[in-house]
Amino acid sequence: MIINGISVTVQRKKIKNMYLRVIPPEGDVKISAPYFVSDDKIIEFVESRMDWILAKQKEIGEKKYLPALKYVNGENHYLWGKEYSMQLIANNIKTAFVKDDILYLPVSKRSKMKARQKTLEDFYRMELQREIAEIYDECTATVGKKPAEIKIRKMKNWGNCKQNKVITLNLNLAKKPKICTKYVLIHELCHLIEFNHSKKFKMLMDKNCPNWREIKKILNE
């Protein structure tokens, strides 16, 4: 359908209500609608949400969406805040490594994307473990607390701290400048004292990592 000059893709489904989505990176508008809803009702529904649709399309248009990674030669990847061009090499080498501006990934010629992804993530894990070991004593001495354990995994948040004193850090921290890992670790260690984001917690952060607000901006870029 073309509604108020906007192309809308309509998909009929066995559902009770209508659902509207504006999908990046192009800002395509899609409607899921029950079989029993008329075209006129769909048009009326879209027109009632037109301000939201236009605002969402504007927001999407202003964002930079990166293409999905395929882990192939020439693709750009990050390590500790620096951009590297990926080069696949023979897999007789044990682990990935960087030299000059190239990240060398040892994989078989017939490897699938998931296998190449795992090889790179294993490398990131090794790098992050090494960095945590480097800063652990300094960070725990600064905050005055030690965790029961530090885990690494892919997650939505940069880090979390459970009440059992187990801290988990995001694997993707290995892509960010090293100062970001230090900030996140201190942040989670402070939760061993104050298990929330209260004013008292922010005072702890100000004391233990005075420039944490600036680092947080770098982390979330």
Image (cartoon, rainbow, N blue to C red):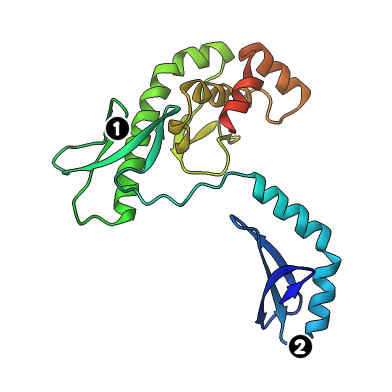
Q: Secondary structure at mark 1?
A: strand
- Which quadrant, please, contains the C terminus? top right
At a point 62% along the width and 26% down the height, the residue shown is 216
Q: Position of residue 115 (x, y in %)?
A: 29, 52
Q: Position of residue 172 (x, y in %)?
A: 46, 37
Q: Position of residue 71 (x, y in %)?
A: 34, 48
Taking the image as shown, residue 53 lies to the left or right of residue 25, namely: right
Q: What's the mark number on residue 36?
A: 2
At a point 39% along the width and 21% down the height, the residue shown is 133
Q: Is residue 84 above or below residue 190?
A: below
Q: Nearer the viewer, residue 188 or 210?
A: 210
Q: Nearer the viewer, residue 143 or 110?
A: 110
Q: Is residue 129 above or below residue 107?
A: above
Q: Earlier in the sequence, mark 1 or mark 2?
A: 2
The residues tagged by marks 1 and 2 sit, at their Cα atoms, a distance apart of: 57 Å
User: Mark 1 and 2 residues: CB-CB less than 8 Å, in contact?
Assistant: no
How many residues crowd around disc 2 within 10 Å: few (fewer than 14), some, or many (20 or more)? few
| Picture quadrant of residue 199 | top right
Amino acid at circle 2: Phe
Q: What's the mark number on residue 102?
A: 1
At a point 37% along the width and 35% down the height, the residue shown is 124
At a point 19% along the width and 37% down the height, the residue shown is 94
Amino acid at circle 1: Ile
Q: Position of residue 36 (x, y in %)?
A: 76, 88
| Picture quadrant of residue 75 | top left
Q: Is residue 31 above or below residue 214?
A: below
